[in-house]
Image: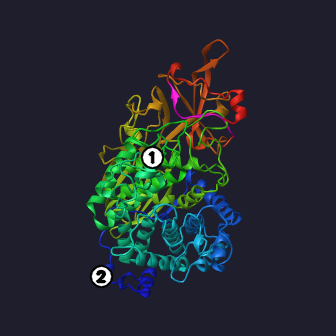
Amino acid sequence: MTTSNIFLLVLGLGAAMPAHAQQTADYPIRAVPFTKVKLTDSFWLPRLKTNTDVTIPASFARCEATNRVKNFEMAAAKSGKFATVYPFDDTDIYKTIEGASYSLSVYPDAKLDTYVDGLIRKVGAAQEPDGYLYTARTIDPAHPHHWAGQERWEKERELSHELYNAGHLYEAAVAHYEATGKKTLLIIALKNADLVCSVFGPGKRTVAPGHEIVEMGLVKLYRATGKPEYLSTAKFFIEARGQYKGYDPKSADPFKNGQYWQDDQPVAAQTEAEGHAVRAEYLYSAMADVAALTGDKKLLAAVDTIWQNMVGKKMYVQGGTGAVPAGERFGANYELPNTTAYNETCASVADVYWNQRMFQLHGDAKYVDVMEKVLYNGLISGVGLDGKSFFYSNAMQIKNAMGYHDTEPARAGWFECSCCPTNLARLMPALPGYVYAQKDRDLYVNLFVSGNTTLRIGKQNIGITQQNNYPWDGGLKFTVNPATATDFTLRLRIPGWARNQAMPSSLYTFATPSSQTATIKINGRPVAYTLQNGYAVLARKWRKGDVVDLTLPMEVRRVLANAQVKDNLGKVALQRGPVIYCAEWKDNNGKTSNLIVPAGVAFSTAFQPGLLNGVMTLTATVPAVEVEATSVRTVPQAFSAIPYYAWANRGKGEMTVWFPERVTAVDLLSQPTAQEAAAGK
C-alpha cells in the first residue's frame, strides 16, 4: 500500500483502500468508545480529573527535569551523551502524550495541546531519515547505550527495547490522532512502522521482541490504516517466540531457559503465565488481538489456557500479578508470598488491557470481574491520592516502616525507571471506554459508574444513564432512553462477588456462602432474570424512561486462599463489594501484625467523607496480641480497616491484608529490634 493510500485511510476515507486491506474479522464485541461515555460519578471522575490536572503535568515536568526530553533534542542535533539511565526512557514521553491525548478528548486544553505539539516536533526531529527512532543510539551512533549493541536491533531480544519504544510510539500516535485529528505523530509512527516491517518478517530478520508491546502497537496502526503488513508483522513477532536456540531448556533459571521473556517455547504451546509479568500480559493482550483479527484458533486456545492459569494460580487477592521481585515476574503456581510481594503497577495496567480483550472475545463476565478487581484495588493503589506519588510495586504486608527487601513502604514522586507513573497517566483517561460494550442488539453494562452514553442499535439512538454510589452502595439505577420504542437486550453484569464467587477459580473463596442475591426491578416491579455468562439478560421492547434498578448485596465477606498458597494458611482477607480491605498502623494502635480476625467477628461499616478523600471503613472488636518480657496474651482491641487502594497516604507504618484467625498463626516479631532498626533492616 502506498503512503498516499495510508493517509486516505487515516483521513477516514476507508472506502478508498484496496479490497485486500479491508478488515474481515475482529472482536465480536466492541467497546463503546470512551469519548462517548460521560462520567458524573464521585469515585472515578475525581480520579480522572486529578490525572488531567496533576498526574499528566507532573509527568511532563519530570520528563523535562530528568532529561528525557533532552535526549530527543540531542538526537536531533546528533550531539551529546545519552542523559538518562535506560534506553526505554523515551517511552515515558510517548505514554504521557498518549494520556494527554485521551485527556484532551474529554477536557480540551489549548495550553496542553500546544505543549504536546512542541514535544511531537522534538520527537520528529530526532527520527532518522529512514524512520528509525531510538535516542539511545541516534545521539551518538558510534557509542550507543551499552544495552543496545553496535548495530540496530542487535540486542533486541534481551536488552535494547528498540521495538518496545516503537510500540509505545504507535499507541501514542493513534491516541493523538483520534483525539486531535492531527497526523503529526502518526506520520512519525507510520514511517517507523514501515521500517520495522521492511526489516522483520518471513525471509527477513527474525526476533522475539524482548519487551513486548510493539505487537499491540502494530495492531492499533492496522486498525487506523488497514495496512495488512502491520497485522502480519505483529503476528510474526508473536510467532517468533520459542525459536531462539541460545537458551538452555533444561535450566530452572527463567533467565537462562527463556521463560523470563516468554520465549522458552512457541506461544501456541505455552500453558502458564510466565516470566516478567508486564511483558507477559502485553504479549497475551496482543495474542488476543491477533486471534480476533485473524481467527487463529491455536492462539485463542493458548491465551485462554494462560488466562485460566493466571487467575487460578498466580494472582493476588487484590488483583496484583507478578509475585517475584527478581525479574518482576510470575512465580510458580501458588507462589504468592505476602512479605515480598512485588505486584508491579504496570502489570495491573497490562492486566486491564488483557481482560478487556478477553471479554471482547468471549462475552463472559468473569473477565470483567477480574478487571474490576484490578481497577478498584491493585491498580489505583499505584497512585497516591495526591496524583503525583506512585508505587512501582504494591505490597501485601508492611511489618515496619522500612518495609522489607524490595517492598516499598511509601510512594515516591518518580523513579529511575518510571514506567509505572506514565502508564497510569495513559490508562486513567481511557477508563470510560470500559463501562459499556455492544454486540449487534446486545448492550453490555460492565462497570458501574454514574454517567451517560448514547449509542446506536439498529437505526435507533439509545441513551443510557447510570446513577449510583458504587462501590460503597449496591443500589444501581439505569434509565433507558431510546429515541423510539426498540427491541434489544440489556445485559447487566452480576459480579462474581455478588454470586458467592470471590474469584472465577478456586484460588480464592468466601469463607461462608451468603443467602443474599442480586435483585432487579424494571419500572418498580421485581423481575425474574436469566443469568448467562455472568450477565442478567433483560430482553424486551424498551421505551423512553424505562428504569432498571439492580441491587447488589454489600456484605463484609471473609476471603480464604487456596490451601496451596502457603503464606495464607490460617488467614483471612476482607472484602466488601469489589473492594479489598487492609488494616493500617494509623488506625490500629500503631501496628497491624498483632491483629487476629477470628470467625464470627461482626463488622460495622461507615462512610467517612473526610478520610482519604471519602472511604467506607470496616470496624470491629478483635483480639490483639500483646508481648511482654515473660508472657504473651491477647486483649480486646478496636479494629479498623480501609480500602487497600488507600493505604500509605498518611505516612509510613505497618499494613496487613491477610489476618491470622488464631493466635498461633501470628508473627510476633512485628517490630524490628533496636539493632535491626539501626542496621536499616
Amino acid of disc 1: Phe
Q: Secondary structure at mark 2?
A: helix
Confirm whether the magenta stretch covers residue 659. Answer: yes
Q: Secondary structure at mark 1?
A: loop
**Vertical arrangement, residue 154 with respect to residue 422, above or below:** below
Labels 1 & 2 near each other (Cβ < 8 A): no
Q: Can you name the residue that lies furthest to the top here?
A: 630
Q: CA distance from mark 1 to mark 2?
A: 43 Å
* Mark 1, residue position: 330
Amino acid of disc 2: Ala
Residue 19's label in the rendered image is: 2
- State how the image is colored: rainbow
> Is there any visible trace of residue 544 in the rendered image?
no
Judging depth in this view, the residue of 102 and 130 nearest the camera is: 130
Q: Position of residue 83 (x, y in %)?
A: 67, 66
- Provide the major secondary structure of the magenta segment: loop
Residue mark closest to the camera, 1 vs 2 = 1
